[in-house]
Amino acid sequence: MISNFTELSETEYSDRRFNILVDVEENGDAKELPYVDSQGIPTIGVGFDLTVGSVRDEVLKAFGFDVNSENEHEQEYLQQIETALSQRYEGDTQAEKNDLLQSALKRAVKS
């Protein structure tokens, strides 16, 4: 029976939970760039599915995008990113698929 408990702040708990996810899901290496996961889904970090609108929006907000902007040009820009993330990337290797995804996103960002 466990008799000693350590009280953690919310920040400490979140940090520990994140580190466990990184260790379990990503072999200790959180992905900072988007990648195509083993199911062919554009993903970032510790398995955040970028094809899911709410997840994609939170990730974009974390990178400084205003996903609620009413500016027409900003909305077109975000639509290009969404289009790049909704594609299926085919390649002979995982690295090739990741390169295709990242190239598509770079094109969207430069538009």
Image (tube, helix red, strand yellow):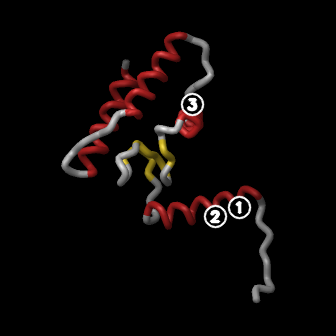
Q: Relative to 111, is 88 above or below?
A: below
Relative depth, front residue between 19 and 40? 40
Q: Disc 2 marks which residue?
A: 16
- Which residue ends up furthest to the top in the rendered image? 72
For the residue labelled by badge 3, is the local secondary structure a helix, a strand or a loop?
A: loop
Which corner quadrant of the image does residue 109 belong to? top left
Please give the name of the residue rendered at 57% of the width and 66% of the height, measured from the top-left corner. Answer: 20
Residue that badge 3 annotates: 64
* Quarter of the view holding residue 69: top right
Instruction: Judge left or right: residue 2 versus residue 53.
Output: right
Q: Residues within 10 Å of mark 1 (few under 14, many from 20)?
A: few
Few, some or many C-alpha atoms within 10 Å of disc 3 (few <14, some 14-19, many ≥20)? few
Residue at 56 percent across and 27 percent down: it is 65
Q: Position of residue 105 (x, y in %)?
A: 37, 31
* Nearest to the observer: residue 51 or residue 23: 51
On screen, residue 15 above or below 98: below
- Mark 1 is on which residue type? Glu
Residue where numbered disc 1 is placed: 12
